[in-house]
Amino acid sequence: MSEMVLASISAPAPRRAVAIVMVAALGILLIALGVFRGPESVLGRVALVIVGGIALALADMMRKATALRLELTATELTDTSGRVLARVEDIVSVDRGVFAFKPSNGFLLKLRQPAGRVWAPGLYWRLGRRIGVGGVISKTEGRNMADTISALIADRR
């Protein structure tokens, strides 16, 4: 039997669509610029096409990532693909401050032990001892999850 979900975060459909379309439009624009009206040098044109292709790949990564949902239980923070982002016992602090290096509308978690690198564009990133949650999520859901994690940390102490 699975644990009860205390808080969850998902990307609202309108924000998700706008973000994906903007990144894809950038990719298409760069490719078109490289093919039709780019710099005189072949190397410059090739660079524009490559960067445009990377932007299109990023748009697809964002499409897949923002289809997921983050779920917080009493023991761990996971996404709906089954990836465990952090165990609650490993979370040291939650930072939602204005000057925190965090994604838009989100929060930053600091962990006891470094974890592997993971990036789900528009939803979260994990690098070393830090996890940034946010991007195209709603501010209310982000704040609710951050407050719930803070309460779990306080209960642990």
Image: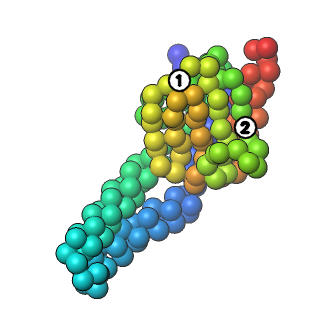
Residue 79 left/right relative to 130: left
Look at discs 2 and 1 and give the one toward the viewer. Answer: 1
Residue 157 left/right relative to 7: right
Residue beneath disc 2: 95
For label 2, the crowd category at 10 Å Cα-Cα, with few meaning under 14, some 14 to 19 and many 20 or more, is some
Q: Regarding mark 2 in the picture, which secondary structure is present there?
A: strand
Q: How is the image coloured?
A: rainbow
Residue 129 left/right relative to 105: left
Q: Is the residue 139 above or below the residue 20 in the image?
A: above
Location of residue 152 (image quadrant): top right
**Whole-percent x, y for residue 155 in the image:** 79, 17
Q: Is the residue 40 above or below the residue 127 in the image?
A: below
Measuring 46% from the left and 44% from the top, which residue is drawn there?
A: 120
**Whole-percent x, y for residue 62 in the image:** 43, 53
**Whole-percent x, y for residue 116 in the image:** 45, 28
Q: Regarding mark 1 in the picture, which secondary structure is present there?
A: strand
Tell me the number on the disc at residue 114: 1
**Toward the viewer: 38 or 109?**
38
**Toward the viewer: 6 or 157?**
157
Say what amino acid the circle numbered 1 marks.
Pro
**Toward the viewer: 1 or 51?**
51
Measuring 69% from the left and 37% from the top, which residue is drawn there?
A: 145
